[in-house]
């Protein structure tokens, strides 16, 4: 409320002026206006229409299809994506701390920004980090289906270290007393999570740097038949599992990246710019980062995966990933996510 002299809390509504509500204090008679909230900054788009447009973009519609449906110009839609997506990323950074994960699976998903890598000039290949082939570095917990963090950039060992270190900071570490030798127990490091990755050479060093002895780590390399045939699904014919630290014997069968690869499919379905065989793509890295931040917040707090066929609850919806990870007590609606993100 905007009231310079009145400090009371007993007031009543006395109408509105130009859409702004007016109030009158019942104790001293001072009239004042309600502070006009601007969650979208200087944009004059109707709030309900903006929520609808963002919801449609999150559910897999393209920018131009959303423009035709809501009559919001595509440039305004891009500004809304950057504003809301950046806020979603900050919101997730604040919430994703002290997590207890059991089995994290890591993977990188290919896309491109501006134009594909083969179209870049020699100078652009040497200097441009925000064009050409870009990879979405993601991870998901096998049990809760939570995506604790993500990174968007080139497929390099440096980004592997950055991403792994960021994920490690978000997990709860055991207290020093828990691993000390006490009560006739042998001292040692207590692993807090199991990690599974593919055969990218940058992962082993990154895992060792970020987690050290606090993680079990294994690598899986899948073998496919007819993997070079265009537009046809490749047939998996085998998999080689290697335990790097703390995984051996029958435990080798727990190494896998199937859940994070299923998450890659969800990302391609819910983000039109990632769809295969379409004309949609990201023109700016900033837009891709904001769009993926928006998807990550929606996936963690609003989306519900389903139980597999062999679980006894075939087809039933699970609680949201945030509920499974004890970050939320209920499944959020998009309106609730919108309000919480922009309020934060």
Image (cartoon, rainbow, N blue to C red):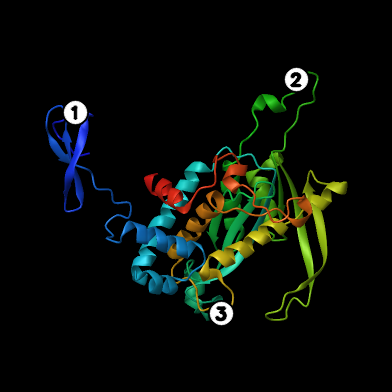
Q: Secondary structure at mark 3?
A: helix
User: Is there a contact, CB below 8 Å, between mark 3 and mark 2?
Assistant: no
Crowding at mark 3 (Cα within 10 Å: few <14, some 14-19, many 20+) = few
Q: Nearer the viewer, residue 142 or 334?
A: 334
| Residue ID for mark 1 | 7
Disc 2, disc 1: CB below 8 Å? no
Residue at disc 2, secondary structure: loop
The extreme top residue here reads 183
Nearer the viewer's eye, disc 1 or disc 3? 1
Residue at image mark 2? 182
Report, in whole angstroms, how far the alpha carbon at label 2 lies from the one at label 1.
59 Å
Name above or below for residue 26 compared with residue 257.
above
Q: Is residue 234 above or below residue 173?
A: below
The residue closer to the viewer here, 221 or 45, is 45
Residue at the outermost right position: 249
- Could you tell me residue 80's position as x and y percent? 37, 61
Give the distance between the C-alpha atoms of the residues marked 1 and 3, in whole angstroms. Answer: 66 Å
């Amino acid at each position: 409320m905007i009231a310079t002299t009145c400090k009371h809390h007993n007031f009543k509504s006395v109408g509105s002026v130009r859409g702004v509500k007016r109030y009158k204090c019942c104790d001293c008679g001072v009239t004042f206006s309600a502070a006009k909230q601007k969650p979208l900054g200087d944009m004059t788009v109707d709030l309900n229409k903006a929520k609808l447009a963002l919801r449609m973009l999150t559910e897999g519609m393209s920018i131009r299809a959303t423009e035709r449906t809501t009559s919001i110009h595509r440039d305004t839609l891009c500004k809304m994506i950057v504003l809301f997506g950046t806020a979603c990323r900050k919101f997730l950074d604040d919430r994703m701390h002290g997590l207890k994960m059991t089995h994290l699976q890591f993977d990188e998903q290919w896309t491109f920004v501006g134009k594909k890598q083969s179209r870049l000039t020699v100078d652009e290949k040497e200097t441009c980090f925000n064009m050409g082939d870009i990879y979405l570095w993601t991870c998901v917990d096998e049990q809760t289906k939570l995506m604790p963090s993500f990174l968007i950039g080139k497929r390099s060992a440096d980004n592997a270290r950055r991403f792994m270190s960021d994920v490690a900071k978000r997990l709860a570490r055991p207290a020093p007393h828990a691993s000390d030798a006490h009560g006739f127990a042998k001292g040692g490091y207590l692993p807090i999570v199991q990690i599974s990755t593919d055969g990218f050479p940058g992962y082993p060093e990154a895992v060792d740097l970020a987690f050290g002895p606090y993680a079990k780590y294994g690598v899986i390399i899948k073998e496919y038949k007819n993997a070079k045939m265009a537009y046809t699904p490749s047939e998996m014919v085998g998999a080689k599992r290697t335990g790097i630290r703390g995984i051996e014997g029958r435990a080798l069968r727990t190494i896998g990246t199937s859940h994070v690869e299923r998450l890659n499919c969800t990302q391609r379905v819910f983000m039109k710019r990632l769809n295969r065989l379409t004309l949609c793509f990201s023109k700016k890295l900033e837009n891709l980062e904001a769009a993926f931040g928006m998807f990550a917040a929606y996936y963690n707090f609003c989306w519900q995966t389903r139980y597999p066929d062999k679980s006894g609850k075939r087809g039933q919806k699970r609680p949201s990933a945030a509920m499974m990870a004890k970050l939320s007590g209920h499944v959020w609606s998009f309106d609730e996510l919108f309000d919480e993100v922009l309020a934060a």
